[in-house]
Amino acid sequence: MRPLLSVENLAVRIRTDRGAAEILDDVTLAVPRGGTLGVVGESGCGKSTLLRAILGILPRNAQVPRGAILFEDRDILSDRGASARGRIGFIPQDPYLSLNPVFTAGAQILEGMRRHAPGSRRDHRAKLVDLFRAVQLPDPEAALAKYPHQFSGGQRQRLLIAAALACDPALVVADEPTTALDVTTQREILGLLRRLTAERGLSLLFVTHDFGVLAAVCDRVAVLYAGRVAETGPTRAVLDDPRHPYTRLLLGCHPDRATDLLGIPGTVPAATAQPPGCRFHPRCPIARAGCAAGVPEMQPAGPGHAVACPFQSDILLEPALG
Ligand SMILES: Nc1ncnc2c1ncn2[C@@H]1O[C@H](COP(=O)(O)OP(=O)(O)OP(=O)(O)O)[C@@H](O)[C@H]1O
């Protein structure tokens, strides 16, 4: 079966005062129907740019010189396919900033439904009350008339999940939806998201910098580094047996995993000054002369698991992890 969403060889370039910045290069990934894909990487690796390209909200100075984004078999980067985006729901990062403080929760979500979902105002209202119940907001009827400040942070994130589901999406795209929340609320919201998407047969594309969050929600993962996919595969395989030096070091930084917090030497390169060849080579503990020469191709590393590094050997990587 063809994936619900496939990003194919996508490049995104942004014109800046310091020249053209290649934010994404040759990004290929897929979200299966009913499946969940997590995109993980450090700040600045291009996660938000990827989401903006999918949602059709790239900045005006951005260009897409190469690649395609197919959603329900339509190229949503083309004018003709763009309307298919109506079936993509979005859960933003910050529940504090993402709701308009001067409108009630009901008014602002119903307005979106009026524009995008079929049915009368009465139908929309009934559907929204059901959704508020599904996201476990207390007193769903009364919640319609409340203002955002009358909800806690976790409840606001529940409102945003309800808003993302209100127009019957086939795909939900979530941008670090729990970073602003405390750990207990984070766990509840992730559990809710996982359950609701599974019950409704929805696909989920989840962006995060946190492998712990990723493991709780996603079946598959794509690790992004400096605008390119470094590694992709089933979440368990990538977490248990990471093959790219970047993934291994990134996992070593996670507090739940690290015996010793190693960190990754150096920083993500500026988008206007990407290194030649493998973009990770200046920070890579096993880099060789050839790594600066050519862009590494994706190579198989196990069932459904691929890595953009020709030196994916455990023995070679062991010294890097101490
Ligand atoms: N409008 C823009 N103009 C110039 N550079 C940009 C623009 N948007 C993003 N960038 C650059 O593109 C790179 C990727 O940014 P992006 O926001 O996609 O990363 P990210 O992985 O989402 O980071 P974070 O987790 O911090 O949000 C960064 O180097 C950023 O500075």
Image: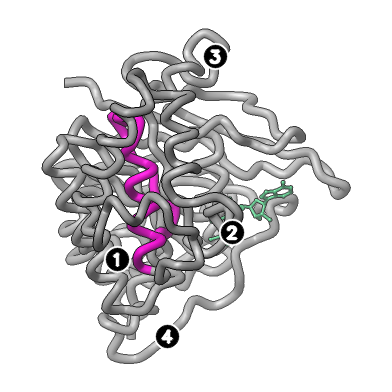
Query: Could you say which quadrant of the image residue 314 lies in?
Result: bottom left
Alpha carbon of mark 3 to alpha carbon of mark 1: how far? 33 Å
Name the image quarter holding the N terminus. Answer: top left
- Give, as a three-letter code, the residue at label 1: Val
Nearer to us of marks 2 and 4 is 2
How many circles with numbers are drawn on the protein? 4
Q: Which residues are magenta?
A: 154-177
Mark 3–mark 1 contact, CB under 8 Å?
Answer: no
The residue carrying mark 2 is 44
Label 2 or label 3, whichever comes before in sequence order: 2
On screen, residue 212 versus residue 247, left or right, reads left
- Give, as a three-letter code, the residue at label 3: Ser
Label 2 or label 4, whichever comes before in sequence order: 2
Say what secondary structure mark 1 lies in: helix
Q: Is residue 62 above or below residue 178?
A: above
Nearer to us of marks 1 and 2 is 1
- Give, as a three-letter code, the residue at label 2: Gly
Q: Is residue 260 above or below residue 277?
A: below
Alpha carbon of mark 2 to alpha carbon of mark 3: how far? 27 Å
**Residue 213 circle label:** 1
Is 76 magenta? The answer is no
Specify whether residue 218 is in view: no
Alpha carbon of mark 4 to alpha carbon of mark 3: how far? 44 Å
The residue carrying mark 3 is 78
Few, some or many residues within 10 Å of mark 2 (<14, 14–19, 20+): some
